[in-house]
Image (spheres, coloured by chain):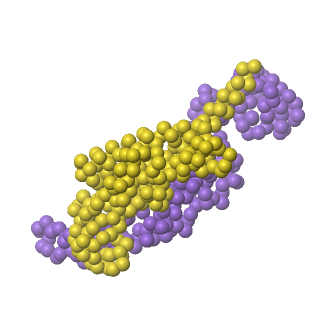
Amino acid sequence: MDADYWSFESCLAEQARLPCTLKLDVEGHGHLLGANESDLHVGAKVSIPMWLAPTLILNDWLDFNIPPPFMQRVKRALNANARSVRLSTLVGNGGEWYGFGKLVADVLEESQAKELQAVLLTTFKERFVDLMDQAQHFGGIPSSAGADSMGDTGADFREGLEMTERELFLLAQESAKAVRLWYESTDRKEH
Amino acid sequence: MSTDPSQALLLECRRSAQTVTLLPYNAAVVTTLIRQIHTIHAHLVQSLRSAAIPGDEVGPTPTPPPAVMFTSTHHHLQIRRLKRVLLVYHSHRLNMLRGMLHRAHLSVTHLLPSIRPLLSPSELTFIRSYAQISMSYRAEFIDVLDIAASVDEPPKGMWVNVRVVKEVGEVITEGGVVDFRKGGRYLVRRGDVEMLLVQGYLEVVD
């Protein structure tokens, strides 16, 4: 989810849409912006993908507000308990909450950007501990019964992981497995 | 609009990376995207031309009205975006191909049968020329290091017990000439037989 030109994950994250309002009139261009009519006027609402948004905003042609995944309600829920928030449902389409958040922070002005970045960081740090813990000990994302009572809350958390967290989860599982295999193989040779 | 086909390519990249498999070349979507680029570009040129104010040739060209700037910037960014998607898709596939070729010890003949239907014509040319370049580079210092050799399992010792699987005949080794007979077992230096092991003529036995 880095800003690497060559990263397809970064490309995918940029497809998330930002609701904006027009600051000027455009004729005949409405359909391309995803609107129903061809002519749009000041104040019209359009949904702009993130690869398009920064330039249009910085050129002062669009206005935007902080999108739903990062509004106050979400911030309050994260403050209360970051682990119980389902990040995967906040952003549709493959659910890249952190990636989208980073892109939004890039177009916000200084003070708001800093605040959003802090939220992203704190959330990540809190959830990461549980993520790693579960990856080392549990099976895949929502597994079936057979787990103890701790397993239930675990399954909820794993379902709520957004895309980047899922990738990390899988990586952690695989490395744990690889370490175990290596340990067992070297063990044998010692005799 | 421009999201669905490009999203298809990006999702293919993701799926191919997650499953570590090469998927068939999506020529249909690639052609669609290229066509979209041409369409948008024609549209862009046309709109700029019609918005051009016929001023005098001496003075500087005045800036077009904001609406025109807005739409042309939009078109321009759309084209850039499609270009990026195409480049990312192709570079992802080429990287995979390079990795596969290296794992096949730079042998195109070994690799090709399994993946041939998945490649586009240009990718086929790419594999062949890349293998060729790598082979000629490798030849320069092959007496010191064989870059096509396997690195999966570090050799456990200098000597190795092998059994002949396919008929090899006489091989010149550092210790002299060895006649590898099919089914026979030999204790040889690793360096001598590395290539034969990789190609499947010999097999390591513990």
The hue used for chain A is: yellow
Among the 4 quarters of the image, the one containing residue B134: top right
Left or right of A94: which side holds A44? left
Q: Quadrant of the image for the C terminus of chain B? A: top right
B154 or A171, nearer to the observer? A171
Residue found 17% across the figure and 68% down from its top = B63
Q: Quadrant of the image for the N terminus of chain B? A: bottom left
- Give the x, y percent position of residue B192: 73, 27
- Give the x, y percent position of residue B9: 51, 61
- Give the x, y percent position of residue A139: 63, 44
Residue found 70% across the figure and 47% down from its top = B110
User: From the viewer's perspective, is residue A43 above or below residue A120?
Assistant: below
User: From the viewer's perspective, is residue A149 above or below residue B73?
Assistant: above
Among the 4 quarters of the image, the one containing residue B191: top right
Left or right of B149: which side holds B172? right
A23 or A149, nearer to the observer? A149
The hue used for chain B is: purple
Can you name the residue that lies furthest to the front here?
A149
A150 or A7, nearer to the observer? A150
- Give the x, y percent position of residue A120: 37, 46
